[in-house]
Image: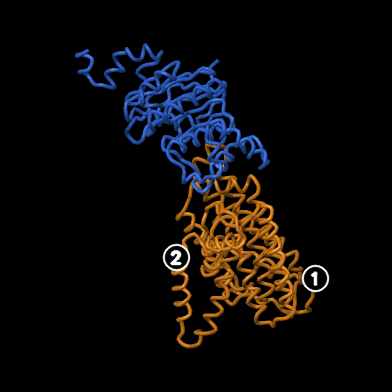
Chain colours: A orange, B blue
Amino acid sequence: MSPRRRMQYYAVLGVVITGVLLCLPLVTGPYFQTVMISLFFWAFVGIAWNIMGGYAGQISLGHAAFLGTGMYTSAVLYVFWGISPWLGILVGALFSLGLALITGYFSFQFGIRGPYFILVSLAFAEIIRVIFVNIPSVGGSQGLPIPLEEPSFLYFQFVEKAPFYYIFFVLMILGLFVNWRITKSRLGYYLVSIRENEDAAATLGVNPLKYKLIALSISAVMTSVGGTVWAQYLMYAEPSHAFGVTMSIEIAIRPIIGGMGTLFGPVIGSLFLTPLGECIRLFVGGSVSGVQLLLYGVILIGVVVLLPNGLVFPLQRLLSKVFGGKER
Amino acid sequence: MKILELKEVSKSFGGLMAVDGVDLAVQKGEMVGLIGPNGAGKTTLFSLISCFLKVSRGEICFDGKRIEHMKCHQLCHLGVGRTFQIVQPFPEFTTLENVMVGSFNETRDVQEAMGRAAEVCDFLGIGHLKGIKAKNLNLADRKRLEIARAMATRPKMLLLDEVMAGLNPTESGMIIELVKQIHHQGVTILIIEHVMKVIMELSQRIVVLNYGRKIADGSPEAISRNPKVIKAYLGENALVKS
């Protein structure tokens, strides 16, 4: 089969999947939609994380900092001043960009790499969490509820699940598009070269500091946007959820399981993990407390051991078997 | 015209003087060999010139500009390319993609970079390996990839650190030819090499380091007869016997 033909098949496959996903809310109930919303959301923030962690190879366990900033900024603006979360998205993104540049600059300028960067990012998110726990005016550790006043598109409030389904779906597609554009540009090549060998990249004219900061900025802004929409969906911003270590891990785990540094890795990871978590909770949740986490953990370990490069690769092989063509 | 000039360059690691007051000038278009016994400070000197390490004392000028406080990528933009003694490919990238990272110095456009990288690959005889991931290449091909990447940045000067090490005679013969061709294109070359035959054949001038100091600087013939050099390589007795 010619590559052109194969591309056509993949395009058709893409259109069919998109079409089915667009029609699903018409025939499904709120529970299914909730699961799908989570799936899209985690896929989107996973894509954001992957640009930094997967492509540029700078693994962060502090992305909750940007997610929480997105959640809290729009929530505070709306609750205290009645400013539409649509504007809040932008303001939150700006704050996250600022935070990303500051922490990134001080980390990368002083050569903090690998495990040390993980620790810095972890500490960074924790610091912000502790700060928010101690600000009573935004609810302290109780969090800040976003009151449902008049459901409207302008104020980003909906009673139904379906609008959020579509918004998160569009976000995920946009995320994929941004990511795809990056991989097809000089930036994409530079990011991977830094991941693969920073010193060699530098001798070839790549400024590691600059490009790591660019990667972190894109990643932070996207995560923050996801955070704002997530807050509108939950109608709640709470420090231990928004800025917690659990959140950072949840953001990172899907691209890691799905396939780091691949376009569809985060989506595949979310497609696997989000329903899995849901099923385990549903079937064994009530029996013994904690057993669901145990099972979830065991399955995670199993996947990592069996498919250390991510779920996306066996899937790719399967697809190329179906559609023909040689593997790379 | 001098393209590279080192004045009193020193580098110490704690108490160890790895490079000790070295003066060195390289003319534009010259091919200079840098030799010396193991641990003489050759690679350290390379790292200083390519801004991987900061000098403890002294100045380095390239093309009339002070470079000793620059970052690696800035030096690349000025026109210095280097290869590493231990090859440093981007393992998950294909050969072509590896070289493209170098080509991106001249263009932002991916298609154009791809075209230029392909030319460089063909020139270095690794054109048939364009689609192979670098982690699957053998050592000889990796060494050529290393040179290809550096050449793709269109350097005025190329620093080659033991590009022949670990290769068999056929393979190193191939690389010698390539280095000659690159030199003919007008690129100034500073080359570290252990194989004497290679360095004698390639270099117009040879600089010898020992214990971080420059002990000789001259034509290959003069160097091969220089008693200090023979002593440094073969020890005190060699001179007495011969």
Of the residues shown, which amino acid type is indicated by label 2? Leu
Query: Is residue A133 among the parts visible in the rendering?
Result: no
Residue of label 1: A154
Real-space Cα distance between discs 2 and 1? 47 Å
Instruction: Find residue B210 and report its horizontal and vertical position in percent.
Output: 33, 23
Crowd class of label 1 (few under 14; some 14 to 19; many from 20; radius 10 Å) = few
Q: Name the image quarter holding the N terminus of chain B.
A: top right
Query: Disc 1 residue type?
Result: Leu
Image location (x, y in percent) of residue A248: 54, 65
Q: Secondary structure at mark 2?
A: helix
Going 56% across and 55% down the picture, which residue do you hit?
A: A261
In percent of the image, x 57 and y 43: which residue is there? B97
- Earlier-in-chain disc, 2 versus 1: 1
For the residue pair A188 and A7, the one nearer the viewer reads as A7
Find residue A106 and report its horizontal and vertical position in percent. Answer: 54, 50
The residue carrying mark 2 is A306
